[in-house]
Image (cartoon, helix red, strand yellow):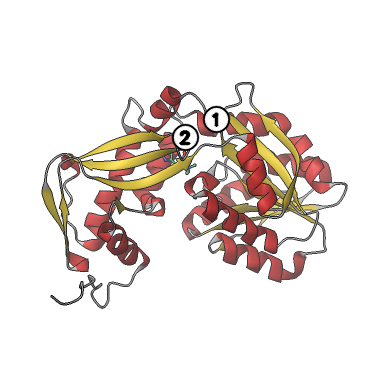
């Protein structure tokens, strides 16, 4: 017998999605990365999730920000002028609360939303500039690390304090090790005293988490399934969404909700753009997302290891969600 032959990606199939799908479907267990959720349809479905009765995450964080925005921006500014950067800005609906409070404090503010989606940034800019004329929006189309680098290189350091928003529990998609790396990358672009505002979803009753990630109306199921539809369209694949089922699992050991797509039977799927045939056994899953749930202790360890020092934190009365303000040490 010769050595194990590794599958090869066909020449030309070198887009980010091609590489991700090829690698993920050749892994055991099979995985696909959560960034694949967010095509146009997936972004709309995520917006719908944030309004579901079971999905407490967005509205709870919004309540915290609405109640404490003035205190948050005052603590971040420390008497100096503040500029605001946001990682993965999305539609930036919660950001308005903080921008408003900053305008009340200092008269005007420059806001740098960083996102890989140019259309999302255009939308945020148009809306914010008409709603809040005292806000200057300077979109940065890049990933977090590169966006932070560009913001830093723009020579703004020293002009005032910077506040980096990383809200919505977006950090929850990363493993603890990767989360530290992400925050270290942010820290590296900040001056001592600049601040990070980190929003994290907290550990809570398991039945509440299950409901939030497997809602009665089936929106989260469609959001998860949309990944297969996207792969069919963009990589000429033959997934039949009816032959998969959405699954939300609580992983106690890793303190995370996992989303999976479970094969309802033994089947074969072709991904023609990748020259790939994928076999599924009955009950086999594709692991599509981790959503880590935090404790104070976990977040503090994370912040410390990334070079931040906690200044203050705010939660809702139920302690479902927490917002941490930390300064670059
Ligand atoms: C955008 C990663 C914060 O984990 O709650 C919502 C994504 N997935 N429902 C989350 C998501 C399923 C969301 N984050």
As helix, strand or loop, the secondary structure at mark 1 comes to: helix
Residue visible at 62% across and 52% down in the picture? 86
Residue 174 visible (yes or no): yes
Q: Quadrant of residue 12?
A: bottom left
Residue at 12% from the left image edge and 53% from the top image edge: 268
| Residue 45 x, y percent position in the rendering | 38, 40
For the residue pair 111 and 37, the one nearer the viewer reads as 37
Per the image, the residue denoted by label 1 is 59
Q: Is residue 73 left or right of residue 324?
A: right
The 10 Å Cα crowd at callout 2, few under 14, some 14 to 19, many 20 or more, is some
Q: Is residue 88 visible?
A: no
SS class, disc 2: loop
31, above or below 140, in the image: above
Neighbour tally class for label 1: few under 14, some 14-19, many 20 plus, Cα within 10 Å: some
Q: Is residue 30 above or below residue 93?
A: below
Describe residue 32's horizontal placement relative to residue 169 as left or right.
Answer: left
Q: Are marks 2 and 1 in contact (CB under 8 Å)?
A: yes
Which residue is tagged 2?
50
On-image quarter of the N terminus = bottom left
Distance from mark 2 CB to nearest ligand 1 atom below 8 Å = no
Q: Position of residue 221 (x, y in %)?
A: 31, 36
Residue 105 is left or right of residue 279, and the answer is right
Q: In this orientation, which residue lies closer to the viewer: 170 or 120? A: 170
**Disc nearer the start of the sequence (2/1):** 2
Q: Where residue 128 sits in the image (x, y, percent)? A: 62, 47
As drawn, the label of residue 312 is none
- Total marks shown come to 2
Quadrant assignment for the C terminus:
bottom right
Inter-mark Cα distance, 2 to 1: 7 Å
The residue positioned 56% from the left and 37% from the top of the image is 294
- Estimate the x, y position of residue 248 in percent, counting from the top left: 35, 35
Report ligand 1 position as a quadrant: top left
């Amino acid at each position: 017998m010769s050595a194990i032959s590794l599958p090869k990606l066909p020449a030309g199939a070198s887009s980010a999605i091609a590489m991700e799908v090829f690698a993920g479907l050749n892994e055991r267990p099979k995985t696909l990365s959560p960034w694949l959720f967010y095509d146009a349809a997936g972004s709309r479905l995520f917006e719908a999730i944030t309004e579901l009765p079971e999905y407490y995450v967005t509205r709870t964080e919004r309540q915290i920000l609405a109640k404490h925005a003035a205190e948050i921006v005052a603590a971040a500014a420390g008497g100096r002028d503040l500029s605001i950067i946001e990682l993965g800005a999305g539609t930036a609906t919660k950001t308005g609360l903080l921008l408003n409070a900053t305008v009340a404090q200092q008269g005007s503010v420059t806001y740098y939303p960083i996102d890989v989606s140019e259309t999302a940034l255009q939308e945020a800019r148009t809306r914010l500039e008409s709603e809040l004329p005292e806000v200057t929006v300077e979109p940065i189309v890049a990933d977090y690390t590169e966006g932070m680098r560009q913001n830093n290189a723009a020579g703004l350091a020293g002009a005032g304090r910077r506040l980096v928003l990383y809200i919505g529990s977006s950090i929850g998609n990363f493993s603890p090790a990767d989360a530290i790396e992400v925050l270290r990358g942010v820290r590296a672009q900040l001056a001592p005293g600049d601040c990070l505002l980190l929003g994290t979803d907290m550990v809570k009753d398991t039945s509440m988490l299950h409901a939030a990630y497997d809602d009665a109306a089936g929106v989260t199921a469609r959001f998860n399934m949309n990944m297969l539809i996207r792969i069919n369209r963009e990589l000429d694949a033959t997934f039949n969404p009816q032959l998969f089922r959405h699954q939300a699992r609580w992983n106690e050991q890793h303190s995370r909700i996992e989303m999976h797509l479970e094969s309802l039977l033994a089947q074969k799927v072709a991904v023609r753009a990748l020259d790939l045939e994928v076999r599924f056994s009955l009950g086999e899953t594709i692991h599509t997302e981790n959503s880590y749930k935090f404790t104070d202790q976990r977040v503090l360890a994370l912040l410390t290891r990334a070079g931040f020092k906690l200044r203050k934190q705010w939660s809702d009365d139920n302690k479902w969600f927490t917002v941490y303000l930390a300064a670059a040490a």
